[in-house]
Amino acid sequence: MKSFGKRANGLRLERMQDSPLWVDGAFRNVHPILPGLRDTQAPRPALRDILRPSGRLLPGAPLPSMSPLDAWRRTPGSGLRATWLGHSTVLIEIDGLRVLTDPVWGPRASPSRLMGPKRFQPVPVRLSAMPPLDLVLISHDHYDHLDYPTIRALARQDVPFVTPLGVGAHLEAWGVPAARITELDWWQTYTLPHADLAVHAAPSQHFSGRGFKDRNATLWASLVIESPRHRVFFSGDTGLTTEYAAIRERLGPFDLVMLEVGAFHPTWGDIHLGPGNALKALDLLGGGAFLPVHWGTFNLAVHDWDEPAETLLQLAPRHGAQLLMPRLGEPVEPAHGLDLAPWWRAVGQAAPAPAAPAGPQPPGEPLPWPLD
């Protein structure tokens, strides 16, 4: 199946093997897991828990969204503007350049078009209607961040890609020319040719893989976008780590911080933030306008779809966080802020899905591919 991607080989593999993060044939997290991040007593969700949302609340209607096309025709007065397009896909306009993070326009976070988590919210703008892009960033190779049909479409454009080590093998297999792919190890930097823009790969605490036998065969990373006037942090997927303090010291301060807040579970505390730990991560990073991502698009966990947003509303004032929660497709300039309004409540809630039928159930099997 082409959507699984391709394993690295040759010079690409040799470069991966030279990384200090490569140990015994795979990448690994090198910083210790903070105490209390993961509940080792709770059962991990199985595939049936993800695909059968028994008891979970879903949106009662499509979420409020807007087309950003008119706004994108106007230059942001502050020089920095972000448009959340769903999940972890954000268009960053920074000093006249356009950078797209983890682009996902496909219908499912899955290798298949027939099964796997299906998006409940469409992207507010067609991929074909997007303005010309200067750079595409990929944080890691999970399906909800690296989408086969989207990459196939972007491969036809003359846009460069920056990824962590090894992820370029997938892109090249899907039609992106090798000359347009740059792969970074943590703390390495890419400079966009003929432009005053740099991208730094930084630590995160996660994992990778798209199939049954490629766990941690590619690297994962957070990413920092830097221009002469602005700095933006994008977490990708991560658990809470003290490395965020090192990122602040080496690459901060940040005008805009994008942290993942959705798809969390007590047993995933070492690989996902959730809203509470996202606010702690924001503190470690030194603050900055906070745009939550990784929610409002797919059902990838066993919590209600709006729980991340509601929890942030409750907790953010205690941290003094400058929370930016725009509607999908609503451009926002961090320097100008945004009135905080719970727009997601306008859709109401669908009735909870019925519980699984009584009687013997299959055991909690591990997920057959990494959903997140």
Image (spheres, grey):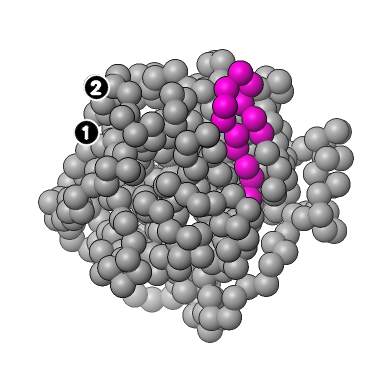
Q: Nearer the viewer, residue 205 or 57?
A: 205
Judge left or right: residue 229 versus residue 163: left
Magenta-drawn stretch contains 195 = yes
Residue marked by disc 2? 70
Q: Nearer the viewer, residue 115 or 318?
A: 318
> Which quadrant would residue 98 be assigned to in this image?
top left
Residue marked by disc 1? 66
Using the image, tell me which numbered label, if any, was put on residue 82: none
Residue at the far front: name it. Answer: 229
**Residue 336: image x %, image y %?**
27, 42
The kind of residue tagged 2 is Asp
Tag 1 secondary structure: loop
Q: CA distance from mark 1 to mark 2?
A: 10 Å
Circle 1 packing at 10 Å, graded few (<14), some (14-19), many (20+), is: some
Q: Residue at x 47, y 39 (%)?
A: 230
Q: Quadrant of the N terminus?
A: top right
- Is residue 84 in sight in this rendering? yes
**Residue 283: image x %, image y %?**
45, 65
Looking at the rendered image, the disc whose residue lies closer to the viewer, 1 or 2, is 2
Tag 2 secondary structure: helix
**Residue 318: image x %, image y %?**
31, 72
**Residue 315: image x %, image y %?**
30, 70
The kind of residue tagged 1 is Met
Residue at the far bottom: name it. Answer: 41
